[in-house]
Image (spheres, helix red, strand yellow):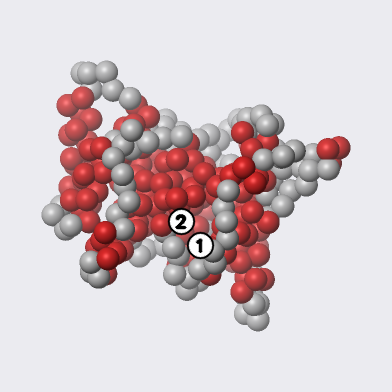
Amino acid sequence: MAASYNFDEYKLLGEPEKAEKSAIWQAAIGLQQVDGLTPSDYLIETAKSHIEGEISIHEVHEQLNGYYEARSAQSSDDRTEEADKVSARIAEILSERAFSFNPAEYITIHKRLFSDMYGHAGQIRDYNISKAEWVLGGETVLYASAQSIRATLDYDFGQERAFIYKGLDREQTVGHIAEFVSGLWQIHAFGEGNTRTTAVFVIKYLRTLGFDVENDLFAKHSWYFRNALVRANYNDYKNEIYSTNEYLRLFLGNLLLGEQNTLNNRDLLVGR
């Protein structure tokens, strides 16, 4: 079990740079929960050194690489290594101001996050997938077919790029964002790492729309975020279960509008 990664102390210090770094690290570490991963104590301490300004993000990567090279001769958990390195890569990407709204950026983020973790990093999957979901009682979402992924990505990005937000109230704006995010995730363009890639891309996109994204929410509720995406893309008409953005809307309301909606994973269970 990793050490606590609640870096709220940095917010209380009133130093904007440290507060921003701590929020980014909390999101980066919290997002590992969507795949059941737990970063190591070493990553937590290294993140604190970065927040304190003692080391650069480049040095974070170097230290992690050295740490795992030294442990390679020992028995080590590859999944912990993934959690640590991907956390650092998310922190780096979220710290950057550069961004381009297109499928190439989305694919590049996947490559940057999972390079040397997955052999398919940055590659669109060429096979169909299914995933048993806890929130669906073991059933799966129907993801985009391998043959349609590129065309579907191009279509969704084109539709969003052409969408006009002007004149929408807050509820309508968040509702539309929920539709875009759930649609992008449902494509499941990659073999693994889709939720983390989507979250990073969406955070950066929302910043370009002028939203002050509450990164901390991903530290506390990343698993809810994933389950909400699942419920937004699952239908079982025979049992009167219908896809709904209701739960994703609650999450985004907290994320973007400072709402205080209760986010309880058990509320999303089908048939409860």
Q: Is residue 63 above or below residue 215?
A: above
Q: Residue furthest right?
A: 238
Q: Give how far across and how far down residue 151 sits, in percent.
A: 64, 48
Most foreground residue, 150 or 202 = 202
Inspect this view and state whether residue 12 appears: yes
Q: Which quadrant of the view contains residue 9?
A: bottom left
Three-letter amino acid code at disc 2? Leu
Q: Secondary structure at mark 2?
A: helix
Q: Give how far across and how far down residue 256 sits, in percent.
A: 51, 66
Q: Which quadrant of the view contains residue 186?
A: top right
Most foreground residue, 79 or 241 = 241
Three-letter amino acid code at disc 1? Leu
Q: Is residue 22 above or below residue 207?
A: above
Inspect this view and state whether residue 204 appears: no
Q: Give how far across and how far down residue 235 sits, in percent.
A: 77, 42
Q: Residue furthest bottom?
A: 167
Find disc 1 in the rendering and name its residue. Answer: 255
Which mark, by number, is residue 217? 2
